[in-house]
Amino acid sequence: MKTKPQLNAKDIFDSLRRERNQQQSSPEIVPSKGLAGLIDGFRRLTRMGHLRTDYNTHCPEAYNYDLVSEILIPESYTAHDVRTFCAALQKFQDTEIFEIKAGVYLSSAVNHAPEDSVELPLAHLRKDLHYMGYKLNKKMRIVGNVGMYLGCDMGPKGEILLKGNAGDMVGYGASHYGKITIEGTAKSISEPAPLRDVVCVKGGVLK
Amino acid sequence: MSIDKKLVEKVRGWYHFPPLREPEIVPELEGGAHFDFSTSDTRISEKFVREITERTGLSRDECLEGILTHEIGHYMIFPRTLGTIMLSGKMLDDFFGSRGKEPAEAERKKQNFIFQTFADMTDDTSSVLDGNRRDSILKMRTASQQTIDDEVNKNIRSLMLGYLHRQAGIGYQLEDGLKPYLERMLQIEFLSPENNRAPQDPQKLRLSLFQWGDIVNDLLKQHGASGTPSLDDLSMNAPGDADIDEILKNAPAGEIRRALREVSDKISRGEYKQVREWLKERGVELPDSSPEKPYVTIGTSRGELQVDEETVRYYRELSKEYPLPVHRKPISTEKTKKSFEETEKWVIGKEPLQALPNLSGGMLLPGITRKVRVQERKIQTTDYDIPHLLTVIDSSGSMPNPSDRKSQAVLAAVCAARAYHVQDSAVGVINFSGDSFYLPYTRDLNNALAAIVAYQGGGTSVDMDILKKMLRPEEFRLYEEHPELHVGRVPQEALKKTVDLSLPSFRKALESGSIDLLMFTDGGIGNLEEVLGFFEETNTLHRGTIILTDRYAQPITEKKDGKIRIYHIKDEKDIPNIVIGDVRGNLNYHASHYAAQK
């Protein structure tokens, strides 16, 4: 009697079944409109090229404070958005005259924020920003170093506490108002110094 | 104690079977469980599993399933690579380092805590969005929440749990005090919405880390008296398995080198330098890649030119991200050929196999038997070979300084130099500015790279008349008196460029061999047309590629059938692509020939 040959070897693929459809959804992210507006405004500013390239045709200057305030700063945002924006600034560091543009833009953003006091973390930036606290008329606390013209043309309520070092020409401008406390050193204070109240806690220039 | 293999395979299957060893169960472990990035091992504490199962009623398998899903997620989702850990550590130190105002240990713990919780959130958010992994993670997280006694940790974990439930679309009762934090958390991009992967862009990672760290900081200020969470609690929720310093210090040199290369491609030149310095400060041993012998000194008429080793190393590492495939091509070359044209006397000591005994009666008779005389003659032939490379790079003041920012021209030149060098070709460099220097063809890649990277920054002067129109009067006065105090760079429009190419250098460089030329400049060269004419007439020049960034809008007439290709580009970022495409085309003869026929 003949028997049918029986195959004992097990095909390992038999044990596999069709893969179940995996239900996968996307994360819910609710971006802050204020932060997105600030980033977008600054991106547009970086694309404006160098200041006064069209000097023959009265084109507004790329780092002109009024231009920044009128065109680039978004309508509504909070001091917290400005603070977070500082972290986003790092990616623009290699753009043309970043130190000036970022300084003027941040000053304008701080001045137009609804809150009376703002804290800015700048220690992570490779470059020191100029014109920080330009036309400031509220309290500002900066953590990190800044460049030239700190507290330029401040208003009567302007107050800066800098936890870091400042560059040249602190308090530059025509204004006689404001108070600047530097918990570090300053390279120089604007001469003649129209700003009366500048205090350097450690080293540098004492006044 | 062991772990069920089927369970392990099930969880690995959810991640498409990553090549990981079986997890190890250990009696006790700080943090409860961890994924070891130096060995790619997963370890789970038996004590931790027992504690969870006893206190919450979760079954052992459910507990292990949740832990495995989470730990393998660290390998598959975030942080995945040592480069990401390195970058995250640097970013956290930038934002949350107190610069010596807080004790180093407390500061380190806080940064590790932020990193650990950020990694957990990215990893677990990915899991709750996946139909297979969702339940196991939520069960495990909910159960472990009940085992935390530390108030700060409990609040942070509760917030995280609330966020995970929100992402999973499941209701969760969160304390009122934590609800504003949840709104802030929803702004963070833990995962990219396009592909559900952790952010690859370092800028997004930086922003997300800052936003999360800010929340943690605020919670610590609100709930923690000391400002630092307690680390005594032995649970998966406590930090301990993501100590950035330990991970970096334990990583082998090869891994650190790989991580640095990964990082160099993602961030700018200045930031890369900072990362290296930061690693040194943290006591991480950096792989020594300094050349065995020092670079050649680069002398110009103005004196010695310093070459920054760090910058050379940066571009060399970065160029490894852009490998160029190289094929040989037929080139007219001079070779020697052996020939047999006459005979001479054979004497003892000469090659007997060349003797011709048939001419002396079948016997080897010194002085009588003749032998063949082998002669070598030079012949001109066509052989498959690769030309040498002459890189001409403009390093005048109008070009970006490669030490300050990523110079695409330098990167492209370094990529090309490496591609030719690896194929046994020699690389020569002409680096021109106000002065020119010529590095003769060399097989020493370090010297060639140093000559490419060297920056002279001359050849430009400021046009004071234009600058006067561009600056405000008081700014111009300040610039005149103290140019060093000028806050911005002098605008491009106010720079005059006065550069001429040195024809003798080119004559010398092109006098021998078969040569490919690659030139980078932003224009403004007085005698460019003359030099281009010289290139067209020179026989030894095979092909030339000139990349003109066109800042100085220099009109050049390109000959249709000429061997010089000229690219006018507006965005510097296009340079590496053009060079890679062009060099690949140059070297891959068959492909370019085929493309031309088509």
Image: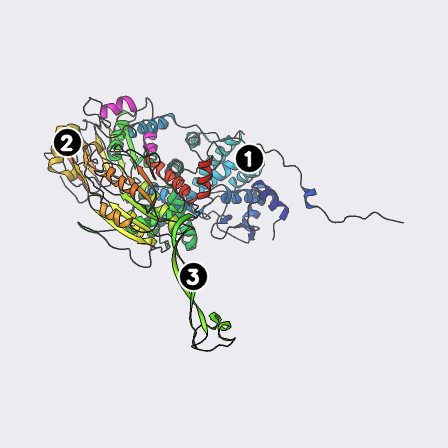
Q: Does the magenta portion include A166? A: no
**Residue position for label 3:** B338
Q: Mark 1 highlights which residue?
A: B130
Taking depth in this image into account, of B524 and B194 the one nearest to the observer is B524
Q: Is B166 left, or right, of B478 in this rendering?
A: right
Residue A98 at x, y percent in the picture: 27, 34
Is there a contact, CB below 8 Å, between mark 1 and mark 2? no
What chain does badge 2 belong to? B
What is the chain letter for disc 3?
B
Q: Nearer the viewer, mark 1 or mark 3?
A: 3
Whether residue B213 is visible, yes or no, is: no
Using residue B83 as the reference point, say whether residue A161 is left or right of it. left
Q: Determine which residue is flagged by label 2.
A: B475
Number of residues whose C-alpha sits closer than 10 Å to that of mark 1, classed few (under 14), some (14–19) or many (20 or more): some
Dot 1: element = loop
| Residue B573 position within the rendered picture, expressed as x and y whole percent measured from the top left | 35, 36
Q: Amino acid type of disc 2? A: Glu
Question: What whole-number distance in Å separates the C-alpha atoms at marks 3 and 2?
Answer: 77 Å
Q: Chain of mark 1?
A: B
Q: Identify the image quadrant of residue A122.
A: top left
> How many marks can you see?
3
Query: Could you tell me residue B68's position as x and y percent?
Result: 55, 45
Magenta segment range?
A64-85
In which quadrant of the rendered view does residue A62 lie?
top left
Same-subunit check for callouts 1 and 2:
yes
| Amino acid identity at mark 1 | Asp
Q: Earlier in the sequence, mark 3 or mark 2?
A: 3
The alpha-carbon separation of the residues under discs 1 and 2 comes to: 60 Å
